[in-house]
Image (cartoon, rainbow, N blue to C red):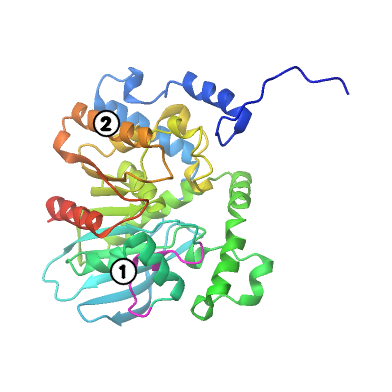
């Protein structure tokens, strides 16, 4: 064959190798059409309204409204609280499994927290990531220690007087994919060995891109389903007589932080949100922080219109806390710092400067106990 056009090859430490400069130039030319900084909006509420509608459009998932129609599966007395396992409808076709933790002795409707589980490369478990059953699956014992400092947050929150709900996100826990190669292990996870978890988890991990392909052909997006289910979780919460509908918060770490970011932005019933270990400007991630993230974090066309700090600003003037891990290898340090500065500036523009706080903890990617205490104090301040 004829020789290629000459080109000097040098290492650039980019996920995309020689294609990185081309992709970066595309990103740098984009002006975020629906950001406040675009200059197209006269008022901040006008920006929020248009940006939220654009976000809903790119999510490509708006099923028909449906009554939650909850079904109680079991109720367990845990001493100072009760754990309920339920399912409820989020669409006419889909029901979601959840745990609801309820403090004993409530004399009036209580504040509630939607505790959004993380990704962590662990598909076999979802809602179990934030619940302490006393005797946990060995895979979850290790997961709790690494990601939650040995203290699953939903259990910690119910002991502070909150009604807490956590659901399985699509593709996790009891909504995971089981390909033919994993059928021999059966469905019931309580009997899985650690080797079973490892092998079945690997099968799920290999199906992330397959899920995105299937949903694309179905006219939907993975984030669209995840965020829709999270919003419908609030529909269920406000139907409970033991929940005060005016005092609902949400929190999560990593993918849970991603979910908390969008739930706070999309649903005004969230009065206080806490995003942990998930925040950056996205352009800063293109060079070397693409492969550190799941397919669920990539929403086609969103970043023609908005950056993540712009999404965060849709929560203003409601309370938003962003807790960053200073030694988080999933994000570039400059992008994390820049994102917090941008959110703070947007909250000032909204006249809600005191309603936002962005804090760094000198830790790797995790939700440590000091971070948890800061989050719990935030909820106490805004939901008490």
Q: In the figure, 9 relative to 279: above or below?
A: above
Q: Which range of residues does the magenta coloring cover?
A: 123-135
Q: Which mark is residue 100?
A: 1
In this view, the residue in front, 53 or 292, is: 292
In the rendered image, the quadrant that contains the N terminus is top right
Q: Is residue 45 left or right of residue 384?
A: right
In this view, the residue in front, 108 or 77, is: 77
Residue in the image at 74% along x and 17% along y: 6
Q: Position of residue 338 (x, y in %)?
A: 32, 31
Crowding around mark 1 (Cα neighbors within 10 Å: few <14, some 14 to 19, many 20+) is: many
Q: In the figure, 242 relative to 62: above or below?
A: below
Residue in the image at 33% along x and 49% along y: 260
Q: Position of residue 105 (x, y in %)?
A: 14, 76
Tell me the residue that label 2 is attached to: 341
Classify mark 1: helix, strand or loop: strand
Q: In the figure, 54 relative to 63: above or below?
A: above
Q: Position of residue 153 (x, y in %)?
A: 29, 63
Farthest-out residue, right: 1
């Amino acid at each position: 064959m004829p020789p290629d056009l000459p080109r000097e090859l040098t290492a650039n430490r980019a996920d995309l190798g020689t294609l990185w400069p081309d992709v970066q130039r595309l990103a740098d030319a984009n002006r975020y059409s629906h950001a406040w900084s675009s200059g197209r909006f006269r008022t901040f509420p006008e920006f929020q309204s248009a940006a939220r509608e654009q976000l809903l459009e790119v999510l490509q998932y708006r099923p028909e409204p449906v009554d939650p129609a909850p079904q109680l599966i079991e109720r367990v007395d845990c001493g100072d609280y009760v754990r309920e396992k339920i399912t409820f409808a989020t669409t006419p076709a889909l029901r979601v499994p959840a745990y609801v933790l309820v403090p004993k002795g409530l004399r009036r409707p209580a504040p509630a927290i939607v505790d959004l589980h993380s990704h962590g490369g662990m598909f076999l478990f979802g809602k179990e990531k934030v619940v302490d059953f006393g005797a946990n699956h060995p895979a979850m014992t290790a997961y709790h220690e690494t990601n939650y400092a040995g203290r699953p947050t939903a259990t910690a929150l119910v002991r502070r007087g909150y009604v807490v709900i956590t659901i399985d996100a699509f593709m996790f826990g009891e909504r995971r994919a089981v390909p033919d190669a994993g059928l021999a292990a059966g469905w019931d996870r309580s009997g899985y060995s650690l080797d079973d978890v490892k092998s079945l988890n690997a099968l799920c991990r290999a199906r992330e891109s397959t899920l995105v392909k299937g949903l694309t052909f179905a006219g939907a997006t993975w984030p669209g389903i995840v965020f829709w289910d999270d919003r419908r979780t609030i529909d269920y919460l406000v139907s409970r007589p033991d929940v005060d509908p005016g005092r609902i918060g949400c929190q999560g770490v990593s993918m849970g932080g991603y979910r908390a970011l969008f739930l706070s932005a999309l649903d005004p019933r969230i009065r206080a949100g806490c995003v942990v270990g998930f925040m950056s400007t996205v352009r800063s991630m293109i060079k070397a922080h693409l492969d550190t993230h799941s397919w669920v974090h990539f929403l086609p066309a969103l970043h023609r219109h908005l950056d993540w700090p712009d999404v965060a600003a849709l929560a203003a003037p409601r309370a938003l806390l962003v807790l960053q891990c200073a030694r988080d290898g999933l994000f570039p340090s400059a992008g994390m710092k820049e994102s917090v500065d941008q959110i703070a500036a947007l909250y000032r523009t909204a006249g809600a400067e005191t309603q936002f706080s962005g804090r760094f903890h000198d830790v790797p990617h995790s939700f440590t106990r000091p971070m948890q205490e800061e989050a719990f104090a935030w909820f106490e301040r805004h939901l008490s």
